[in-house]
Amino acid sequence: MSLAQVRFGLILSQEQSQTLTQQEIETYQRLGFTILAPEGHFAPEIFDFLNGLNFEIWPVLPQRFLIRTAQATDAAQQIRWLRRFEAVPGFNSIIAGWHADLNSARTSRHLAGLSEQLREAFPAQPLYLITKGDDVPSPMLRPVPDAGLSLPTAPFKGAPLLLPPGPAADEHHFFVQTLREGIRLGYQVFLTDYDNLQIYLDDDFSGLAQIISGFQRSPNPAIPLPAAEQYPGSVNYGVLILIGLWLSFAIHMRFNPNYSRTVGRYFFNHSFLVEDILRRHILLSGSVLVVFLQAAVMWGLFSLTFITSFLGEAGMQALSWYFPVAANDWFLFTIGLVFGALFNGLLWAWLIISCFRRDVVSMSATLLFWPMHLGLFLLLVLLTLSGSSAGSVAVLAAGGVFVLVQLGSFLVAAAAFGRQPTLRPAAHLGVTFLLYLSLLSLLAMLFVRNSTVYGIMQLAFWLNN
């Protein structure tokens, strides 16, 4: 491989492109970068400044994480945006998108149609798509594999490679290792985004500059690196929350004998326990509030664990792209907790109203919340799968069982309530069982057809499998 063919490029977000300064460009040039890939227009003085430099300009169209339900941008608008870069001599490539859901026929058709119009408007510029492996929806698009998802052999001569996010520890070791492997597989251009670059930079930039210059001189340079450092692992708050749930369950069992007897009976002697509850032989007013709170926390832990495990790193980037606040783990936990409390509270009120009586508050809560104890075991399974880096299918299966148990608790409670002699079973099941299933079916259909979250889940599943 010719040494001149090994090049490094920097992807700049829209804001970073618009605020780019001459000093920053000179810094990137000293580091060894020869490609700038902006997602926004530069300031007018930067366009003029770049005319005197040897930077290549690869504009990136604002199409990150394109999903089926996302509003696709107009091709004519994209072309007008790109025309501004024709004033720069180094404008010689276009990145048409970044991680689109190519399993979606609608998304693939959009990208294929866009590539045809881009090729007609800019016949001299190669068109790239940052993607998984070498998957592209059109032969006019050249793949830029994401090394964070897979690292296949270079799909064509001179192929670019997107470097994955760097780790918090030993970032230079990771950077060098990825470059060696990429060059071995035939890649000649290495792209990283600005945020990722900050991880690799040290105070005086000397470490990264030495690495880049070394690889520009030789495909396998001898680069002195500091000894690998040992960093303590990050705290897994999900495990701590689950331990807290189990401790609260154990303490509740230990100090409330009436509660402890009902939990086992619910699962192993269900019919007799239901009869005792309906005859008001068992009243657990305080315990139902404890279990209600535990169930809400279970939903919070499920939200945090399932979303981060199923989506993976690429999926979480997509989720944060559409919903920036979702990058915070505590937000994911809180949104699940609030949903669980509101949803279970609504179901509890529904059961009470369906009986047309005010003396069933404790009774209805016991029948509704006791099946949710299974969530303690299912969350343990889910956290285990998450910690063992199990695949998306296993995480989806465990998460699906958890949701079915939580949603199915209302059906079990409604069926049990239907055994009361004061109720007409057919009418009661109609306003609870059948209406509930109808509403869930409608919500599930709307979620699948129109939800951005579901589109992100589809994208993440495709990227991770």
Image (cartoon, grey):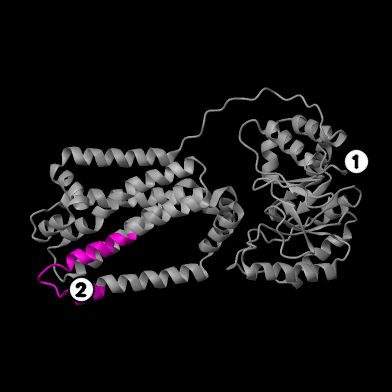
- Residue ID at (86%, 33%): 218
Q: Nearer the viewer, residue 45 or 261?
A: 261
**Would residue 73 be visible to someone looking at this image?**
no
Horizontal side, residue 65 vs residue 60: left or right: left
Which residues, given as a range, are shown in magenta? 407-431
When the figure is inspected, residue 139 is found, relative to residue 231, above or below; the finding is below
Q: Which mark is residue 2?
A: 1
- Residue ID at (39%, 38%): 240
- Residue ID at (17%, 44%): 260
Residue 12 on the magenta span: no
Which residue is denoted by mark 2 in the rendering?
428
Q: Secondary structure at mark 1?
A: loop
Quarter holding residue 116: bottom right
- Residue ID at (64%, 71%): 106
Residue 415 on the magenta span: yes
Residue 420 spot, x, y in % from top left: 12, 67
Q: Nearer the viewer, residue 24 or 265?
A: 265
Marked residue nearer the N-terminal end (2 or 1) = 1
Q: Main secondary structure of the magenta part?
A: helix
Q: Amino acid at mark 2?
A: His
**Would residue 191 be visible to someone looking at this image?**
yes
Horizontal side, residue 431 vs residue 213: left or right: left
Q: Secondary structure at mark 2?
A: helix
Estimate how packed mark 2 is, as few (under 14), some (14 to 19) or many (20 or more) residues with alpha carbons within 10 Å. some
Horizontal side, residue 333 vs residue 373: left or right: right
